[in-house]
Amino acid sequence: MEQAKSLFDEIGGWVVAQLPESLVGLVSAVLTLIVVLVLHKVTRKMIISAMGFQHRTEAQIKQFTTMWKYLFMLVGIVFVVVSMSASLAAMGLTVAFVSMILGWSLQRPVTGVAAWLMVMIKKPFVIGDRIIIQGVRGDVLEISPTHILLGEVGGTIGGEESSNRGILIPNAVLFDQMVTNYAVSQESKYILAEINVRVSYDSDYRLAIQVLTDCASRVTADIVSITGKEPSVRSEFFDSGVMMRLRYQTIATERERISSDIVGEIVEAFSSSPDLGFAYPHSTVHYRLIDASTALPPMFREARSASAS
């Protein structure tokens, strides 16, 4: 066995000695390329199998395998150059050159990957949170190494309900833009909301406050029991009455529904009470019977008395 191995080594050494140096480098490069391609095929199948076991979507699998292919292309280029030159100096120059090209052409994607790592480590928001980036409001559906997928909130409507439109935002903007998170954690996922109710001057002020807080407490009973924060009212004057700002704790993703339910409760409560009324811009004319002689200006009274005499 050892004799066969030594014979094979002698034959291989003789073949290499007979070949030109450039051809030896070319053969080494081809063999290296074949090895890299085989490794790519094997690892790709392993990755697809592992991600399928984790129930990842086809889009996620395709995205990751595409990145894996580009990584192997980069590694293959480096090893092919080294194989052709058989020099560590050539490998260093190749790596430096490729790094320069990547740093120049892929600056934004590289910044995006760095932002993705920041999000994964610090977790300023997670999937399911409602955030605002670059003035775009939406629910986080996916966080990938290059983009954040938001389910748009509003957009086609004036409120804060889902429009069923997806928005891709590059991760690179996270280093340049402010990000507003409606709920920074599961323990503080409730936000303060407000409903403005215009109450007329002739309404019972204290009764109006009691009715408003009761309506909000009934709708948000579960939230009140968790947070311990009761609804409150802040009042101020305006032209047609008193502006009562009803403030309460709500869930960001359920804000529109909860607000609508509270408004329904308020309308029913005001409609059933004779001491409460909504204020609205209107004009009122009051008529009063008075003595005609005293209603005239003094000059007209003197003229009238002179003609009578």
Image (tube, rainbow, N blue to C red):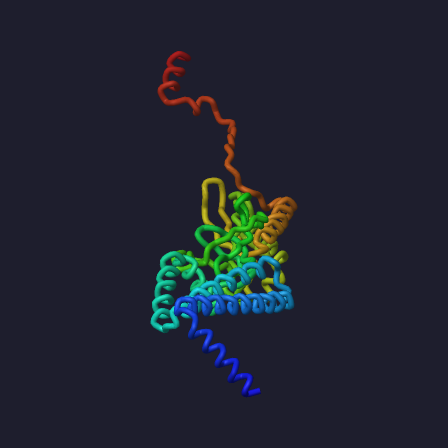
Residue 94 in the image: state x and y as whole percent.
Answer: 37, 66
Q: Extreme bottom residue here? A: 2
* Residue at the image position 44 percent from the left and 74 percent from the top: 16
Toward the viewer: 179 or 30?
A: 30
Q: Which image quadrant for residue 2?
A: bottom right
Residue 20 seen:
yes
Toward the viewer: 256 or 202?
A: 256
Position of the N terminus by quadrant: bottom right
Residue 199 seen:
no
Position of the C terminus by quadrant: top left
Toward the viewer: 159 or 271?
A: 159
**Relative to 302, residue 104 above or below:** below
Residue 114 in the image: state x and y as whole percent.
Answer: 43, 64
Residue 270 in the image: state x and y as whole percent.
Answer: 61, 46
Residue 23 in the image: state x and y as whole percent.
Answer: 43, 67
* Residue at the image position 51 percent from the left and 27 percent from the top: 289
Left or right relative to 37: residue 23:
left
**Relative to 12, residue 194 above or below:** above
* Residue at the image position 46 percent from the left and 70 percent from the top: 28
Left or right relative to 273: residue 18:
left
Toward the viewer: 285 or 225?
A: 225
Number of dots carrying numbers: 0
